Image (tube, rainbow, N blue to C red):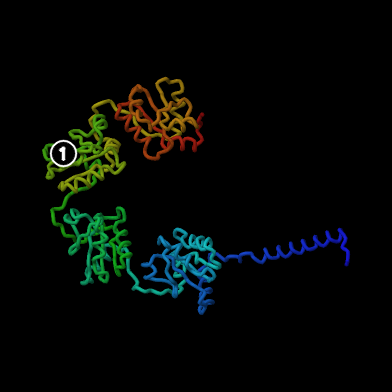
């Protein structure tokens, strides 16, 4: 029997341990997951990939757009999995992860192709390529597609082009998408009326024959409702639809014919000088009425002679207008063109079927700028916006004036972070803000400021102080943000 020494035994154990360690290490390396290929490629690189895999059953093209867009046009042999579907990720997860995939969306919008790449990477797909510029980029390079439905013609045209189209077509439908009352006032001959603002608008469109040619129009460019109607009809797979760019407004401006089912209204803007002439011509006319739609406080400060006051901001404003004789002639005005209140008043009176209404363009502000006369029932106030430089000059001029007060109308936290020296803080958002202002001496001079012009809070405060009969108030245009941006000092 061979004797083994203790030293030899220890060396043997160490040798065996080393061998086992090497084997185990080698086993770990052999179990590494293969590297994924998940990347964006160009349309030309996508074309090369498709051509290299023409007869490869393990190569799959996925179009991740909506089914209707896929039906209209797609790359040959693509399958469709809708990214917007709730089951999209589940559908992807069912696919063979070891195959090679090419995916694409419409274009760059929303990065949906890139998001699909991320999902497929997380699902452990081995090799996925995204055509980064989508089908738009593919077509822009003249590469081929399959169109399963006829190409649509969905576009804007000018009134003259629309007029020519009407003359040349018999199997042709004109759709007026305005409200029924506006349609009743005036429309293009032979038009039908489908109200865009109706809850059933899309359902009514969907009932129409999609193979006919359609011309749609709205009032003008406002809200681009004509363009939105085009989009809806494209999604509903209408073949040929045109929208009159500029709507009925531009159509009538170009002198093209309309049908007027009720007598035409005169609802329009006039300059202050034209308004003044109108007033002179109707001095003794009891059927000529001037309406000031400002707040009672502003009306009391200053208004055009013989005007009556109907407050636009009142809840009963429309009802008060509706009580008036629609056959009279009216001249209306607001403070300025701000907020579109003058324009909205015109629209309301048009819808209430007033026959003849004029609005002073630029309102009372422009009227007074042109030196035209007003009635001032209380002394003139100075309520205006000024630049940071003008505000700084005003502060310098009033350094020792106890009747000059600076008011920061931001929150206490914002005020604490930095404010104009000597300013006091009255928080606009406080419930008792108006009451706090009302306690101040109205005969002093005030400079107010907010953070910026956002939300019109500075302007609303000016209006409030005007209504409370402060004599002289200035606000810093652009607020503390602009003050600091122009390098003027603040304190904490």
Determine which residue is flagged by label 1: 289
Nearest the viewer among 214 and 61 is 61
Q: Give coordinates of residue 177: x percent, y percent.
A: 24, 58
Which of the two residues, 404 or 222, is positioned nearer the viewer here? Answer: 222
Q: Compared with residue 150, is residue 483 higher up or lower down, i.e. above or below? A: above
**In which quadrant of the rendered view does residue 189 lie?**
bottom left
List x then y, in percent, for residue 115.
48, 60
On the picture, is 263 further left or further right than 233? left
Q: Viewer-proximal residue, 431 or 387?
A: 431
Q: Where in the figure is residue 490, as x and y percent of width and height? A: 50, 31
Q: Residue furthest front?
A: 1
> Is residue 36 visible in the rendered structure shown here?
yes
Report whether 262 appears left or right of 221: left
Instruction: Please tell me which residue lies in front, 75 or 446.
Output: 75
Q: Return the residue found at the far bottom.
A: 55
Q: Is residue 253 visible to us here?
A: no
């Amino acid at each position: 029997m061979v004797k083994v020494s203790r030293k030899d035994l220890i060396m043997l154990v160490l040798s065996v341990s080393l061998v086992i360690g090497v084997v185990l290490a080698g086993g770990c390396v052999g179990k590494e997951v293969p590297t994924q290929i998940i990347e964006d490629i160009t349309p030309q690189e996508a074309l090369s990939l498709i051509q290299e895999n023409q007869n490869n059953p393990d190569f799959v093209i996925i179009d991740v757009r909506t089914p209707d867009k896929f039906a209209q046009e797609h790359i040959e042999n693509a399958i469709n999995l809708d990214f917007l579907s709730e089951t999209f990720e589940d559908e992807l997860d069912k696919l063979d992860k070891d195959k090679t995939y090419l995916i694409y969306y419409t274009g760059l919008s929303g990065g949906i192709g890139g998001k699909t790449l991320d999902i497929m990477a997380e699902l452990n797909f081995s090799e996925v390529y995204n055509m980064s510029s989508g089908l738009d980029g593919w077509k822009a390079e003249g590469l081929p597609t399959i169109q399963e439905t006829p190409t649509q013609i969905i576009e804007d045209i000018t009134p003259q082009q629309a007029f020519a189209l009407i003359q040349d077509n018999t199997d042709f439908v004109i759709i007026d998408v305005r409200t029924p009352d506006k349609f009743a006032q005036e429309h293009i001959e032979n038009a039908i009326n489908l109200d865009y603002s109706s809850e059933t608008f899309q359902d009514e469109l969907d009932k129409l024959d999609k193979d006919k040619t359609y011309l749609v129009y709205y009032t003008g460019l406002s809200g681009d409702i004509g363009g939105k109607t085009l989009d809806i009809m494209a999604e509903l797979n209408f073949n040929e639809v045109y929208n009159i760019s500029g709507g009925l407004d531009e159509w009538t401006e170009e002198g093209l014919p309309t049908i007027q089912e009720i007598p035409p209204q005169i609802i329009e803007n006039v300059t202050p000088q034209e308004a003044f002439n109108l007033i002179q011509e109707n001095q003794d006319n009891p059927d000529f009425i001037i309406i000031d739609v400002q707040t009672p406080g502003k009306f009391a400060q200053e208004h055009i002679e013989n005007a009556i006051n109907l407050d636009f901001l009142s809840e009963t404003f429309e009802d008060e207008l509706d009580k008036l004789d629609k056959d009279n002639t009216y001249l209306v005005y607001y403070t300025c063109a701000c907020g579109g209140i003058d324009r909205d008043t015109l629209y309301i009176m048009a819808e209430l079927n007033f026959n003849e209404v004029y609005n002073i363009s630029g309102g009372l502000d422009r009227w007074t700028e042109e030196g035209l006369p007003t009635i001032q029932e209380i002394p003139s106030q100075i309520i205006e916006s000024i630049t940071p430089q003008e505000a700084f000059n005003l502060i310098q001029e009033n350094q020792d004036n106890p009747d000059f007060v600076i008011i920061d109308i931001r929150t206490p936290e914002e005020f604490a972070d930095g404010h104009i020296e000597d300013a006091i803080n009255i928080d606009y958002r406080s419930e008792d803000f108006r009451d706090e202002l009302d306690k101040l001496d109205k005969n002093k001079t005030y400079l107010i400021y907010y953070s910026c012009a956002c939300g019109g809070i500075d302007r609303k405060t000016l209006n409030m102080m005007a209504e409370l009969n402060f004599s002289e108030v200035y606000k810093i245009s652009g607020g503390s943000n602009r003050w600091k941006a122009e390098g003027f000092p603040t304190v904490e």
